[in-house]
Image (spheres, grey):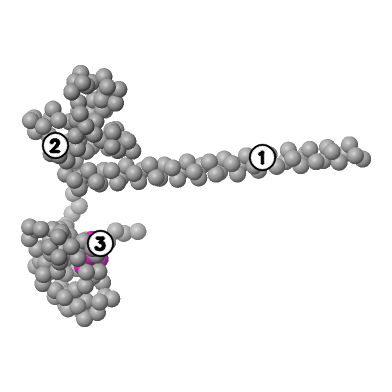
Amino acid sequence: MAVENKPLMPKATAVWLVDNTGLSFEQIADFCGLHPLEVKGIADEDVAKGIKGQDPVATGQLTREQIAEAEQNPAKRLKMAAPKHKMPSVRQKRAPRYTPVSKRQDKPDAVYWIIKNHPEMADADIIKLIGTTKATIQKIRERSHWNASNIKAVDPVTLGLASQLELDLAVSRAADKVERAQKRNARKGATLKSVAETTAAPAVDADADAAELEQN
């Protein structure tokens, strides 16, 4: 199933559409991949403060005709305009997270905070978010880190090691992984139980047949 394209700068696009069109919050949210309440927050200036609007018409993502039609019909949903030029896909190599030298000493505090507050996050998730190593995480878990007596749990956002968005996304993904694993285990357990019951059934029938033979 193909994934529908969304604007490269969804909130900036939503800001422009709120300010310059008569589209409904639902129409803007659907086009930008946002929640209608986020769009309402943009309109109320509670969300996306300071974000400059991005004109989707100027960038070729929408046409004036599409907007006009959608303004007349609240049920109509906007679609990304077909690009005039097809750009070749380029696979970018992910660069390792860089942490300024001045903040590297804060990493153990951030790792300890995650371990305490989000045990659902695996070592790989922490490594990706904070930019630390598996060995360091293990030492902090075991309290065998060379500076263990001075390590305290501090939110990585407060330390400037990750943004709130990055942290929320990492926690959400970790929770999803745990939920999927629990569902797989539940299905596996149900399957094993069904197989066990099916296997045990002939034994019960055999006992009944033996009792019937004794009576005869």
Crowding near the residue tagged with mark 2, few <14, some 14–19, many ≥20 C-alpha atoms within 10 Å: some
Between circles 3 and 1, the one closer to the viewer is: 3
- Disc number at residue 35? 3
- The span from disc 3 to disc 1 (Cα, nearest Å) is 50 Å
Quadrant in which residue 57 is drawn: bottom left
Prevailing SS of the magenta stretch = helix
Residue at 40%, 45% (x, y): give it: 180
Q: Amino acid at mark 2?
A: Leu
Q: Nearer the viewer, residue 44 or 184?
A: 44
- The span from disc 3 to disc 2 (Cα, nearest Å) is 29 Å
Earlier in the chain: of badge 1 and badge 2, it is: 2
Q: Is residue 189 above or below residue 67?
A: above
Residue at 24%, 46% (x, y): give it: 168
Judged from this view, the residue extending furthest toward the bottom is 72
Residue at 7%, 57% (x, y): give it: 50
Instruction: Please provide the residue range marked out in magenta.
Output: 28-35
Label 2's element? helix
Would residue 117 be seen by someone viewing this image from the given angle?
Answer: yes
Residue at 9%, 33% (x, y): give it: 100
Quadrant in which residue 43 is drawn: bottom left
Between circles 3 and 2, the one closer to the viewer is: 2
Q: What residue is pinned by disc 2?
A: 159
Would residue 59 be seen by someone viewing this image from the given angle?
Answer: no
Label 1's element? helix
- The span from disc 1 to disc 2 (Cα, nearest Å) is 58 Å
Quadrant in which residue 157 is drawn: top left
Q: What residue is pinned by disc 1?
A: 199
